[in-house]
Amino acid sequence: MMKQRLVLGIMSGTSIDGVDYALCRVGARGLDLRALWSARFPSALRAALHAAARGDLPSHQLAQAHHDLGRFYARHALPPKAVRGPRPALAGLHGQTVFHNPSRRRPATLQLGEPAYLVERLRAPVISNFRAADMAAGGQGAPLATVFHQWVFAERGRHVCVNNLGGISNVTSLDWRRGARPAVLAFDTGPANVLIDLAMRVLSSGKLNMDRNGGWAARGAPREPLLRRWLAHAYFRKKPPKSTGRELFGEPFFETAMRDMRRLSPCDKVATLTEFTARSLALNYRLHLPSLPSRLILTGGGAANPVLVRAIRRQFAGGQVEVLTSDALGWPVQAIEPAAFALLAHLRMEGKPGNLPQTTGARRSALLGQESRW
């Protein structure tokens, strides 16, 4: 019988803007959200993490960032007083990805954030470094939220897709129109917020980190010739299992895109990058899913951008696909990824695998994560 636990999930994504914490009750009967809160990175830590993701930090500064981030996670790890209740019995820490190379010849991944500080603060076990075991088993180390999506959103008789719009966009297809269990397919579709956020930092001279509510994109117009060129990127036609990150759709792509858009107004640039996210998502669906879903659930920070959500809806116009955010189903958009790592930590403590080999490409199911104890 699976034990019931109060588990804290901690996630900081590719956008490198801050941390989301989700306190969840997890057990054999399911998973429910008890509290959700966030903490924004201070400017110095955010700058160090961006430099690490670019490969610009020497080893001693990388080590410093690893420990600084661990202390930051720990400092904000207890819920605000207004919602404070029992302390978590366990925590799942994703960490901050600064490198992810899923190639079969030389796979590697690195998430910063020393877990020892969390162990000391919570006085509870912490599970971290989730991706390595799947990669050692021949997988891509991603996507890992798939098990959570299946637990919470699969619906018998329907084909449902859950699409997280973090820095990178990833989709989980849950096709349960036949069989005892849903057929699951999951992969990264390409960029979500990462290019938009980079553009906002550059265009605002560092004053803004995101296009809040799509305000800039709403005042601009996307450029079709650029979209057609960018959508020819080989990654979009690569068959799953596949995963990506800032290596393909971070700073290198952004610098090329900014040169391509040098004659556009700032708002047109942001509008074009926003439309690129929507169209690359839809292109992947049409190329790699067995069919379009009847329901598409958007999660992550990008699901709070109404301009991006409208752009995605336009890609599925015609009534075939119901597009909604996870908020409409009782799960705040920022809760999904930290809650997923709460579940993965729980599964690790139960001795149960956390990956789905058919989605990551691994040879076998694997116990994910490494335990640090108090």
Image (spheres, helix red, strand yellow):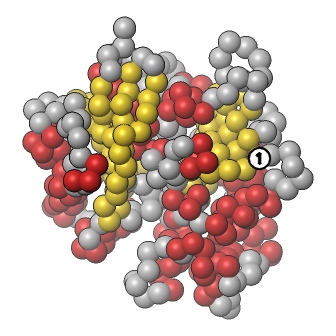
Q: Position of residue 348 (x, y in %)?
A: 33, 23
The vertical placement of 182 against 78, above or below, is: above
Residue at 46 percent across and 52 percent down: it is 334
Q: Is residue 250 left or right of residue 53?
A: right
Choose top left, top right, bottom left or bottom right for residue 320: top right
Residue at 46 percent across and 24 percent down: it is 30
Q: Position of residue 119 (x, y in %)?
A: 14, 39
Q: Position of residue 262 (x, y in %)?
A: 63, 88
The vertical placement of 55 against 268, above or below, is: above
The vertical placement of 197 against 29, above or below, is: below
Q: Badge 1 is on which residue?
A: 322
Few, some or many C-alpha atoms within 10 Å of disc 1 (few <14, some 14-19, many ≥20)? some
Q: Position of residue 245 (x, y in %)?
A: 50, 54
Residue positioned most to the front = 82
Q: Is residue 91 left or right of residue 183?
A: left
Residue at 55 percent across and 31 percent down: it is 152
Front-most of residues 77 and 94:
77
- Viewport quadrant of the N terminus: top left
Q: Secondary structure at mark 1?
A: strand
Residue at 52 percent across and 74 percent down: it is 212
